[in-house]
Image (cartoon, coloured by chain):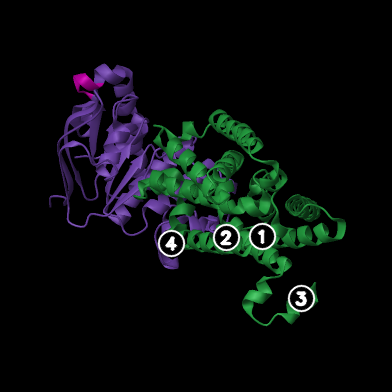
Chain colours: A purple, B green
Amino acid sequence: MPAELLLRASNLSYAVGKRVILDGISFELKRAQITTVIGPNGAGKTTLTNIVSGLINNFEGEIERAPELRIGYLPQKVYVNTLMPLSVLPLLRLTQNSSDQEIEHALAQTGVSYLKQRQVRSLSEGELKRVLLARTTLGQPDLIVLDEPTAGVDVSGEIRMYELIGELRTELQCGVLLVSHDLHLVMSKTDQVLCLNQHLCCSGQPESVSQHPEYLALFGQQAADSIAIYAHHHDHEHDVDGGHAGHQHD
Amino acid sequence: MLTVVTRGTSMTEWLDDFLVRSVIAGLIMVAIAAPMGCLMVWQRLAFLSDTLGHAAVMGVGLGLLLEVTPVFGVLAVALLIVFSLNRVDSFNSALSETTLAIISHTGLAGGIILVGLLPAQSVNLEAILFGDLLATTSADLVRLLITTLVLLLLLLHHWRSFVAVSVSREIAQAEGIEVRKVQFLMYIMIALLVAVMMKVMGVLLIAAMLVIPTTSARLFSRSPEQMVAVSALYGLGALAGGISSSFQFDWQTGPAIVVCATLLMLVTLAITRIFKSHLD
């Protein structure tokens, strides 16, 4: 069964003054698929997520969204004001009215139910990330857009975070657009990779992208090898665990 | 004093009493200073109110020179500053300490020169600088009330956006709130607030009334709205203490209110410290 199309971008370009940030990008996002955007600093990754989320509208090209597409967006750097008294529950209700059940469920999904009465300023970086991730799943989004969701989290936290994103995809049956620097950690969970450097260098399944000449030129053979190793490691773990369904890349 | 109050039967007669007028003015000020002060503390904007306050002296001077009510001169200058700050490409860099300090002190210096040019009996510089709550006129009261109602309505209507922008610009932006517009609205509201608070607190002490009760409230508040409510209580305490000590010891009212607010804050700080060390 072909996955439901959520969003199709055709020939997106975006420039600030004379500086070209995105140049002729086309891709599709589908339900229950994880699409990872990789690329060097300044490649236009955050601009792309802003366009997809509808925060930038003066681009060239075309974006078709599925009717009534709901998007949950977690921006790259979220500073939460520590001068304010605010506990986790009101943080989740900041801009939308969600029921108690919805909020409890969202927090449970990201494994942080125990934080709901805590003051936001007392959370660790990793706890805050999970709370914010729970926030993006409120209101039953069809697509969640996560811009480097693991920045500031330690390596074991990162691995758990990516596992969590995989679980959310399965449970919510939503599309995921993920920007990441941690190629080797993300690749095994990903259905589609967009390798971005202003233009779309290459795209496709992780294995094919990691052998693409433009990818190798950007990230080098070592990165490609480490992906292969992690992919293998991950497959192995899967056989033993078996708890997480639906990550096969065929 | 009280006999005057009870003798009056109609509202207007009642308002004839200067003490009644000043208490009402003080209460109105407390009501608006609490929510505005909280927002300003959260967004680190206390210095902006200081700047607008200092530059307001220029507005007073201009107002007197052009023979309009000084409040309107102040409002014009404050709005001019806010609008020109907003024209700068990056608003945040426009709000840098240096820029604000230059505007603040130039406004104060220019204003003092202007005021000095006016005939001595037409200006009470001390009242401009430190406020003169006890000299509140009925016209002052009406202006204060109308402005406060406008500000409160704006606050109620936009409270969620204001809080969201205060909590996290990034989250607010990601969810489609136009952060820059919301902030600009807040700056205009601060300009309005400064213009009306000037009469009560004086240009030098406005920021104190926005920051000190709020800081006390922050010591033990658990939610933004609770912090606003508790700030209002602290404001009330400072107002009561200020007015009575002003009568008792013949202190100037504005400075007396500020000193009371600080005393309340120190007491709260001490209590929360003791409470915490008992918990440990």
Q: Which residues fall within the magenta stretch? A: A211-215
Mark 4 belongs to which amino acid?
His
* Label 3 sits on residue: B4
- Determine whether the residue tagged by mark 4 lies in a helix, strand or loop: helix
Q: Reading the chain from its start, which is encountered first: label 1 or label 3?
A: 3
* Label 1 sits on residue: B136
Image vertical order of residue A57 relative to residue A226, above or below: below
Q: Are marks 1 and 2 in contact (CB under 8 Å)?
A: yes
Question: How crowded is the residue under tag 2: few (<14 C-alpha within 10 Å), some, or many (20+)?
Answer: many
Distance (Cα) linking label 3 and label 2: 24 Å
- Determine whether the residue tagged by mark 3 lies in a helix, strand or loop: helix
Question: How crowded is the residue under tag 4: few (<14 C-alpha within 10 Å), some, or many (20+)?
Answer: few
Mark 2 belongs to which amino acid?
Leu
Q: Which quadrant of the figure has residue B64?
A: top right
Residue A4 as seen in the image, left or right of residue A110: left
Q: Reading the chain from its start, which is encountered first: label 2 or label 4?
A: 2
* Label 4 sits on residue: B157
Distance (Cα) linking label 1 and label 3: 17 Å
